[in-house]
């Protein structure tokens, strides 16, 4: 049994989440519930694998053999009924890096790429940084749930000659786990108009009861011909800092163009620790993940029940990911007032406007921490907002 209630001091470890309050203009004693990493120790077998590499004392160039692929393939087959071929796999240091390589390798400067806001902001930033045009087909929000406007989505593709769609599933920050029928409708539109789909599925293992993650290419066999599936163990096992992800590209031509772009960066092998950690996590991390999901479900229920009882804030229970989207709009205050009040409360959340204009009045809270921290944070919010 793992103890997710343990409060582990992360200050003084160069933690992006805990050690850079001054850089972001936040109170030093604010409770940081913003960055999407966990405050939990990783599975013991993964720590052991990393320690084994560390104890060896030589950290030269490293790669992996057949057993690495077999381990990854087995995980996705058992967990998601997703059956990959070895040649599809391309390793990368991270999913955002992979998105950048797909953008550079499969589109041209000035091309339009469609997204759905509110959306994990590095996606749009990467599009713009590579001189492409981000086209937003905003998700529709009603009563705590996001849905897709397919008419707007297709019209934006036609009007802007869109070349690529970056899908986020499970959705960050909205928490939706898109249904098979929803993905089918999106895929058919993209297929019809020759749009490449890059599916960010980094949160695919963090799925709450009553919901099921569907890998995009599992929706329809034909979708594999124009799709890239981006995965990593980083969110699932709290391994973001050791840089390892697995990207699956069934189409040979797309894969060749993508790999060419990676080679052009000068990137070679992955981090030696990352390779060991990834394999150990997928081989031996199942028990830890099962216990984690029970704990996260408890955290989500606590925040939902507490805020619903004590406030007018609308907590949107995630279907997937450990990130909860909070709707403060019922309080009828400006987004700047919201930011100021949270600073006063000394609670550090991710600002909704960083995910898009339609994120005004929202905040994203990270549930992957000991419940005692969540309890203190929620109490501070209620006390400061006088609600």
Image (tube, helix red, strand yellow):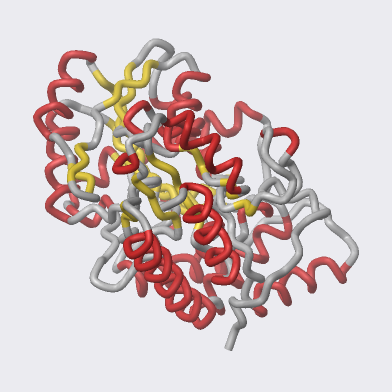
Q: Is residue 249 visible?
A: no
In the picture, residue 113 is in which quadrant?
top left
Residue at figure coordinates x 37%, y 16% from the top left? 133
The furthest residue to the right: 57
Residue at figure coordinates x 40%, y 66% from the top left? 306
Residue 276 at what x, y percent from top left?
Answer: 67, 65
Q: Nearer the viewer, residue 376 or 158?
A: 376
Q: Total of numbered circles in the picture?
A: 0
* In the depicted structure, whether residue 93 falls above or below residue 193: below
Left or right: 94 as drawn, with respect to 195: right
Q: Quadrant of the N terminus?
A: bottom right
The furthest residue to the top: 110
In the picture, residue 65 is in which quadrant?
bottom right
* In the depicted structure, whether residue 54 falls above or below residue 29: below
Q: Nearer the viewer, residue 371 or 345?
A: 345
In the picture, residue 154 is in which quadrant?
top left
Left or right: 28 as drawn, with respect to 330: right
* In the depicted structure, whether residue 94 falls above or below residue 232: above
The furthest residue to the bottom: 1
Q: Is residue 148 visible?
A: yes
Residue at figure coordinates x 41%, y 50% from the top left? 248
Left or right: 259 as drawn, with respect to 194: right
Left or right: 29 as drawn, with respect to 69: right
Residue 293 at what x, y percent from top left?
Answer: 44, 74
């Amino acid at each position: 049994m793992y103890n997710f209630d343990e409060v582990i001091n992360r200050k003084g470890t160069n933690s992006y989440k805990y050690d850079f309050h001054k850089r972001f203009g936040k109170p030093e004693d604010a409770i940081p519930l913003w960055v999407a990493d966990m405050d939990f120790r990783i599975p013991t077998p993964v720590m052991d694998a990393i320690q084994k590499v560390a104890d060896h004392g030589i950290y030269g160039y490293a790669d992996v053999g057949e057993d690495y692929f077999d381990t990854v393939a087995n995980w996705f087959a058992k967990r998601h009924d997703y059956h990959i071929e070895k040649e599809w796999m391309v390793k990368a240091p991270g999913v955002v890096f992979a998105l950048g390589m797909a953008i550079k390798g499969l589109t041209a400067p000035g091309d339009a790429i469609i997204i759905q806001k509110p959306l994990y902001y590095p996606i749009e930033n990467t599009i713009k940084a590579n001189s492409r045009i981000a086209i937003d087909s905003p998700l529709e929000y009603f009563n705590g749930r996001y849905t897709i406007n397919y008419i707007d989505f297709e019209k934006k593709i036609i009007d802007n000659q869109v070349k690529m769609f970056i899908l986020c599933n499970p959705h960050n920050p909205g928490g939706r786990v898109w249904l098979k029928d929803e993905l089918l409708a999106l895929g058919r539109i993209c297929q019809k108009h020759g749009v490449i789909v890059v599916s960010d599925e980094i949160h695919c293992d963090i799925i709450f009861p009553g919901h099921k993650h569907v890998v995009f290419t599992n929706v329809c066999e034909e979708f594999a011909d124009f799709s890239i599936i981006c995965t990593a163990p980083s969110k699932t096992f709290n391994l973001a800092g050791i840089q390892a992800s697995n990207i699956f590209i069934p189409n040979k031509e797309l894969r060749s163009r993508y790999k060419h772009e990676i080679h052009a960066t000068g990137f070679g092998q992955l981090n030696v620790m990352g390779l060991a950690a990834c394999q150990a996590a997928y081989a031996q991390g199942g028990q830890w993940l099962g216990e984690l999901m029970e704990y996260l479900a408890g955290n989500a229920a606590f925040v939902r029940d507490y805020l619903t009882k004590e406030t007018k804030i609308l907590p949107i229970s995630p279907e997937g990911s450990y990130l909860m989207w909070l709707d403060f709009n019922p309080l009828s205050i400006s987004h700047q007032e919201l930011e100021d009040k949270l600073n006063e409360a000394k609670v550090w959340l991710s600002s909704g406007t960083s995910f898009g204009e339609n994120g005004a009045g929202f905040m994203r809270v990270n549930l992957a921490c000991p419940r005692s921290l969540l309890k203190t944070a929620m109490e501070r919010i209620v006390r400061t907002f006088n609600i």
